[in-house]
Amino acid sequence: PFGLKTEYDAGWRGAPIAVRSEAQSVNINPSLSIQLGQGIYFGLGMSVQRFKAELTNETMFGPLAVSARDTSTGFNVGVLVRNAGDARLGIAYRSAIGYRLTGDASFSAAPMHNGNVVADLKVPETLSVSGFTPAGPKWELMFDVTFTRWSRQDVITVIQTTGINAGAVLAPLDYHWRNTQTIGIAGNYKPFADPRTKI
């Protein structure tokens, strides 16, 4: 669900903030669905998500590498309405997931400053509305509108919990991200579809 990587050349001007940053999440999502009525379906799932982050930057003690991880849970729900002509409209919600990331900080040039770290992180929830409709025997049209509440990602504070730097803020990551909306429109063309086939 979430993954990114950025890497800058050593010695660049923003090195005290970041040199290499990598985040990765793996999601397992068992789900169940039921038919509520003619052409109306409801689904419910649970997300079990593993999140891992690795961050490096330059400090007064030399290069710093922070690695932290956690596993947490969330949920998702959806409703799908389908008519006799196979047109469909769906609404899906995926919850935010909060993490208490724990790991370690390593100062390659000053190992006496090494120690454990902790940081709180919340990945955003999403709300999607999507549709599908046949448009003749060879065409299908689709759309999707998704809202993502990135504003939940304000400031991430990495705090060292052990060692001689215990209590120190190692990486105050100041994001202040804004919410986003994405719109997608697509079509399928089936050149070999039999025009006599009933949709």
Image: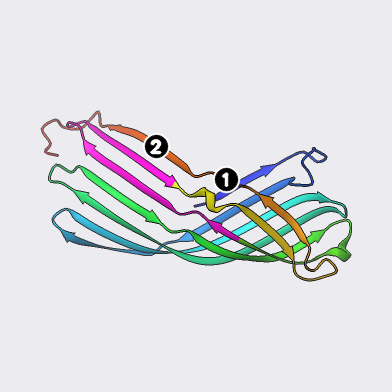
- Against 79, residue 74 (above or below) is below
Left or right, 11 with reference to 123: right
Q: Which residues are magenta?
A: 121-147
The structure residue drawn at horizontal position 83% and vertical position 58%, both measured from the top left corner, is 107
Q: Position of residue 198 (x, y in %)?
A: 11, 38
Q: In the image, what residue type sits under mark 1?
A: Trp
Label 1 packing within 10 angstroms: few (<14), some (14-19), many (20+): few
Left or right, 99 with reference to 102: left
Magenta-colored segment: predominant secondary structure: strand
The structure residue drawn at horizontal position 48% and vertical position 66%, both measured from the top left corner, is 73
Residue at the bottom extreme of this rendering: 162
Q: Does the magenta portion include 73? A: no
Depth check: give the residue in front, 162 or 107. Answer: 162
Q: Which quadrant of the view contains residue 191?
A: top left
Q: Which mark, residue 183?
A: 2
Residue on which the image places disc 1: 177
Q: Does the magenta portion include 135? A: yes
Q: CA distance from mark 1 to mark 2?
A: 19 Å
Q: In the image, what residue type sits under mark 2?
A: Ile
Depth check: give the residue in front, 100 or 189. Answer: 100
The structure residue drawn at horizontal position 21% and vertical position 50%, both measured from the top left corner, is 81
Q: Position of residue 86 (x, y in %)?
A: 18, 43
The structure residue drawn at horizontal position 20% and vertical position 61%, both measured from the top left corner, is 35
Quick one: SS at disc 2? strand
